[in-house]
Image (cartoon, rainbow, N blue to C red):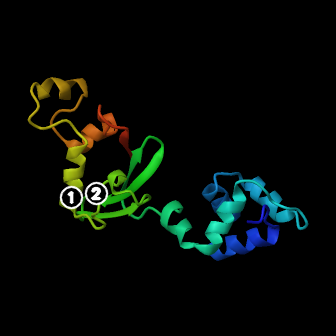
Amino acid sequence: MEEYITSEELKRLRSRLGVTQVEFAELINSSKSTVERWERDKKGKITGPIVPLVRILENRPNLAERYMIVPDKKTPLRLWYMHNNKRCTMIDVDDSKQFVKIKNYTDDIMFRAFGINEEPTYLDYLEFLESRCFPRTRDKIKIILDELQIPFYDPFLIIKKTEGRMAEDDFWISIEE
């Protein structure tokens, strides 16, 4: 494998992916100024971990769209199902229309919010929320709700307070409203 890429190869890939310098920098977890410097240096050789990543994306550009690029938010609510600091599933929700759309960022079904279900219903979404909370039937539930300053059992409100964290795993939920 070649140990370097050129500025022209980088520009060609960025054009093929249809991303700006800023978006490409986010994609590779770098800064815009780094991408600008790489593209400005016509005779330079770009080395490092970017080389194999560029080669992979040249051969399979759909990987960037599938696993890395985040679509624009089109619903009032977006949830991120996370494992430690890794995105697993993006969940867009419109409660008024009972609409749910997801995008998985992993192929491992154990890390997906809805497992093998690629098109969950609104009911699936509600069940998922409840699965990330303590059970409705838990003993002394009123005391727990008081501690959380929640007036009644509502999985969404509980997740807002607890981030859907459970004692036995490293999954959690981030909410964008």
Q: Give left or right: position of 104 versus 65.
A: left
Residue nearest the observer in this picture, 155 or 24: 24
Q: Is residue 81 above or below residue 161?
A: below
- Measured as percent of width and height from the top left, residue 164 is found at 31, 40
Q: Give left or right: position of 172 versus 10.
A: left
Question: Mark 2, mark 1: which one is toward the viewer?
Answer: 2
Asked where in the image residue 103 lies, by quadrant, the reply is: bottom left
- Measured as percent of width and height from the top left, residue 174 is found at 40, 45
Question: Mark 1 or mark 2, which is nearer the start of the sequence?
Answer: 2
* Disc 1 secondary structure class: helix
Label 2–label 1 contact, CB within 8 A: yes
* Disc 2 secondary structure class: loop
* Identity of the residue drawn at 91% across and 66% down: 43
Dot 1 surroundings within 10 Å: few (below 14), some, or many (20 or more)? Answer: some
Q: Disc 2 marks which residue? A: 114
Residue nearest the observer in this picture, 113 or 36: 113
